[in-house]
Structure formats: structure tokens, C-alpha cells
Amino acid sequence: GLATFMIVSREDVPLYEADLGKGLEASSSAVAHSPGGGASPAGHPGAQAQKRDDAAHLHQFVMHAAQDFVEERMWETNGMYLKLVDRFNDLYTYAWVTAGGCRFLLLHDARNEENVRSFFDEVHQLYLRVALNPFHTPRTPIENEVFDRRVRQAARRYFP
Amino acid sequence: APSPGGCASEARMSAPGASARACVSESALDFLLLEATRQYLDKGEAGRRALHRMGFQVGAQLAERHTKHRARFADSTEVVLFVCKEFWPAAFGKRVDSLKTNNKGTFVLTDNAFRWTRHVAAVGPSADAGESARRAVAAEHTRVPAGMLTGFLATLGYPAEVVADAKNAPAVVFTVRLQGGATAT
């Protein structure tokens, strides 16, 4: 289903964002797998691209707004998996926070807490490899292609 | 604790399914640190700060790595106990030997046989001069570890000032002063 994923550092710096979902229309399956998977792929009908663009903006907006709820939940529990933190119409925001305070947010159109937990756990492992890179700093956006590829592979597995 | 193979530090995460952890040769690490410290000390105060920053980055990354499977820390006591029992063996090959606190944000960690300074030696015109030279050199070699501890705590939400005292080397005392009641979010 539909999914957008975001990583925000402890100091509230956005480190990574990816549109992982299949897109709005059935015919967009080719689009979803294109490199980068961005909101407005070149060469597609203008109306469809616009619709995807609007959706991507909405998703980003909802996730940014959900950060307050993420922080509230962090006061309530010391656990890593914060589960569902916010709901906007039929979009659900799930969150995960590492011991170092780095937050993962997932916007999803389905309710499947255990799948999301497994996805977060796997991405946490991938994130660690990036974080342990000596050239990575807490404010560096993650632009590693291998990371991006593996995150999308995990998403395809957990959110078919 | 060091494994029978003699490696005391882990170099990278073990791959899923791997039975043995990749290790770093402790001698190689000793030599690297000795040489790095010596080179940076030649650069004066800027070099000293660079050593601390190096340690800070390593400590910060180790914090993420070693807390992968646990919940966030509830308070400063919990995180310092974690430092003594789990971070210290992973980074320095053994547990902290004693921990004291004034319950007002200051913790004193004592390692009676700090591994990273155990090979430090210096000579002087007399036994006393040699001994004080040795202690001075040992003190310089606590800059990276002090930085590591600072980075470790800061990343977990507990910024602190860390001061290392190597007057009684091989015993090294690390004094941690947590900054202004900051709590982890």
C-alpha cells in the first residue's frame, strides 16, 4: 500500500525521506520503481504528475505535523517502537525512536502494527551502518544509494 | 572481557548469522592511538581539542551501536550504570571498577587498570622525573577516551563535562558532570 518514510535526527534535522508506496493509480507501478521514486516523474501525463505531487506534499505535511505527537509519546514510554502516533483521515503515522533520539516516521494507509515494527527494526539496522560510517555526522542527510535501495526493498516486502 | 584470541574491541557489527565477531587487534589499536595522540599533541591546544572531538565522534557512534536493542534510558543513573557495565567493556576491554556519585549529577568512574594507558612509558634523568613524565604522557592519552565518554553520553541525551585524572596511572579516574539537569527526550 501507500507509504512514505522519513528519518529525523535527534536535533530535528531531516536526514532522509522516501516515497515508498505504489502511487495513486494502478498504471503507476513503473513509476514507483523508477530510480528515486520521486513525486513528479518527468515525461508522465501532467494531471497524474500533479496529483502525485499534491499527495506527496500532503504526506510530508502530515508527517511533519505528527512530530509533536511523536514527542508526546516519547514522554509516555521509553520503548523504541511508539506504534501509531497520529491519524489523518485514512493515513496513519507510526513512529520509532532510537536510543540516540533519532526518529523514524512512517505514513501508511493500512493498520498493521507488527509489520511496521518489523520494517522499523530492519531500517534501524540499515541506519546503524550509515551512522557508524566515520564520514557521517549527525547533521548529514543520508544520500547513500545502498541505504536507499535496501529501505525500498524492505518496504516492498512489508507493504506489498 | 577480552576474548581468548586477545582482541578486546569490536571493529564492526557482526553480520546476521555470523558466529564470530570481527575483532580489532588490541596492539594495533594501541599503536594507532599512541601515534595519533603524539602527532596531535605536536599541534598544541588545537590538537588537544581535535583529540577530544575524535573521541566524541567515536563515542557518539558507539552509543547508537550499543543501544540498538534497548529502550531509552530512564535517568542519568541508568545510563551511567550502562557505561560502567557495558560500554566500558566494549570500548576499553573491562568494566569500570568503582562508581561514586553525589546524587546531584556528578559521577566518578574509576578504572584501576585502564587498558589504553597501560603501555605508556617515559624516561627522565631521574626515577622521579621519569615517573612524572610517564604520568603526564598517560594523562594526554586519556583525551580520546574522555571524548568518547562525552560523545557517548551526549548522544543518549546526557550532555556532560568529562575530566580524566591519570595521576595514579595505571588507574584512571573519569569525573562526569552532567549539564544542567538535561533529560533525554
Image (tube, coloured by chain):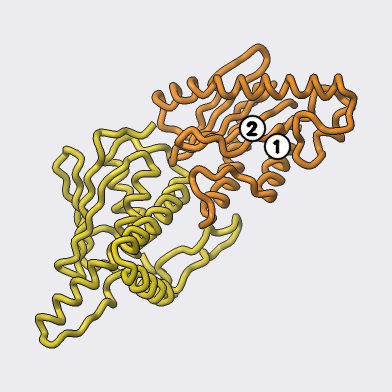
Q: In the image, what residue occupies the spot 85% across and 32% down? A: A29
Task: Give coordinates of residue B182: x percent, y percent.
Answer: 29, 34
| Quarter-of-image position of residue A24 | top right
User: Which residue is identified by label 1?
Assistant: A155
| Marked residue nearer the N-terminal end (1 or 2) | 2
Q: Is A67 located above or below residue B71 in the figure?
A: above
Task: Give coordinates of residue A147: x percent, y percent.
Answer: 65, 47
User: Which residue is identified by label 2?
Assistant: A5
Amino acid found under the numbered disc labelled 1: Ala
Neighbor class of circle 2 (other Cα within 10 Å; few <14, some 14-19, many 20+) is: many
For residue A7, side relative to residue B77 (left or right): right
Chain A shade in the render: orange
Quadrant of the snapshot with the N terminus of chain B: bottom left
Quadrant of the snapshot with the C terminus of chain B: top left
Which subunit holds the residue at mark 1?
A: A
For residue A91, side relative to residue A97 (left or right): right
Task: Give coordinates of residue A50: x percent, y percent.
Answer: 80, 21
Real-space Cα separation, disc 1 to disc 2, in angstroms: 9 Å
